[in-house]
Image: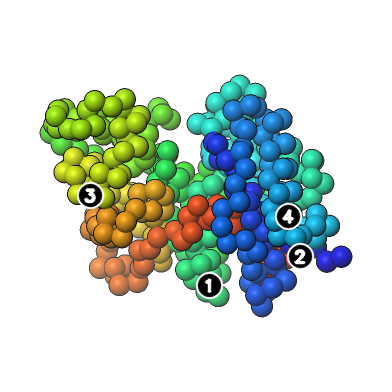
Amino acid sequence: MARSLVVGLDNGGTANNATVLDTAAGDGAGVFLVDALVETPSRVLEGPEAAVDALVSSLEGVLARTGSSAGEVGAVGLDTPGPASADGVISSQGATNFSAPAWHGFDIRGALEKRLGLPVVYNNDGNAAALYAHRMWFGPRSGEASSVALVVGTGLGGGIVERGRVVKGASGVAGELGHVHIPMDGLLQDGQPVPGCNCGFAGDAESVASLTGITRNLLPYWLTRFPDHELASLPVADAARAVRGLGERGDAMARAIFGQQAKALGRLFTIVARVLDPEAYFVGGGVVEAGASFRDWFMAEVRANTDLYPDQSGNVTFGLVPDLDMAGARGAALAAAEEAGLLG
């Protein structure tokens, strides 16, 4: 039986999403056999053993959904939130989704590969989404082009793709753009404290452009400027999750918060432009999964705050990470298919 299928597994804090790529279809480009989220509980809070069991169940479930068998699978792609090594060893300092000590230094890729008896290729979730956006945007030109993606979620994920390949770096942490320091002068209001990040930095991009940044830094400050705001009576975590909906409706405080986030992304892209000079800049995450009017406003603000040289301005694209809730699993599958030599 030909092993032409690749399963992509996107691991998250609450759920795994799975997809199946048929590498023998689509004239060598491959075809995804599912066009929707296929989610199951990730069980990461129960520890590594339960989480690996959950990944195996996720793979079995998506194969059953597509009428496929394990004998047809040639490789598996896995992504998780970082930080982790290029080979899928969770940071010894832990991570947001892997805070329990049992996770520190755990080889999640190797453990899954041992359970499945199949090659498993690892990427962090930002890299996987970046690869998918790159492939969908450039198509046959993917191997000639370069791009950078930022994904705004609980944190700020990032990924760099050069000539169609994810740039991982020597330790696997290339593309951790959320933890790059950005200029705060002109971004913060007079008297607004310099934002702090969970990583220990002050004034990095994630400290502004993330849900954690809203909860920890932006919302507490802006509520001092809008003390009678409807969110003032809510617990700060609940209030932070409500900010996007208010931003879509044009609420002044919410727009001020997202204006700072857009400015932070633009300043980060400005740094990227000087260092990497990519052809495309992609933004993903909940902030661009909003209504069209809000999304267009936000992306226009990001673009306006990205300072490019005149020679760069006419040669670049600003776009959205497509199919974002499926982008991680799909990018993980594409990376594994390439590593296994299954795509033309």
Point 31% across, 25% down: residue? 235
Label 4 crowd (10 A; few <14 / some 14-19 / many >=20): many
Assess whether mark 3 and mark 4 are in contact (beta carbons under 8 angstroms).
no
Q: Quadrant of residue 201?
A: top left
- Residue at label 3? 249
Residue type at mark 3? Answer: Arg
Q: On screen, 234 above or below 290?
A: above
Point 24% across, 25% down: residue? 233
Point 70% across, 56% down: residue? 65
Residue type at mark 2? Answer: Ser
Label 3 crowd (10 A; few <14 / some 14-19 / many >=20): few
Question: Disc number at residue 83?
Answer: none
**In front here: 16 or 115?**
16
Badge 3 or badge 2: first in the primary sequence: 2
Q: On screen, 47 above or below 276?
A: above
Given this view, does label 1 or label 2 mark the residue nearer the observer?
Answer: 2
- Residue at label 1? 139
Which image quarter is the C terminus in? bottom right
Residue type at mark 1? Answer: Gly
* Outermost residue, right side: 1
Query: What secondary structure is marked by label 4?
Result: helix
Q: Is residue 51 left or right of residue 306?
A: right
Residue 179 % position (x, y): 41, 39
Disc 2/disc 4 C-alpha distance (Å): 13 Å
Residue type at mark 4? Answer: Leu
- Could one spot residue 189 in this view of the protein? yes
Given this view, does label 3 or label 2 mark the residue nearer the observer?
Answer: 3
Given this view, does label 1 or label 3 mark the residue nearer the observer?
Answer: 3
- Residue at label 2? 4
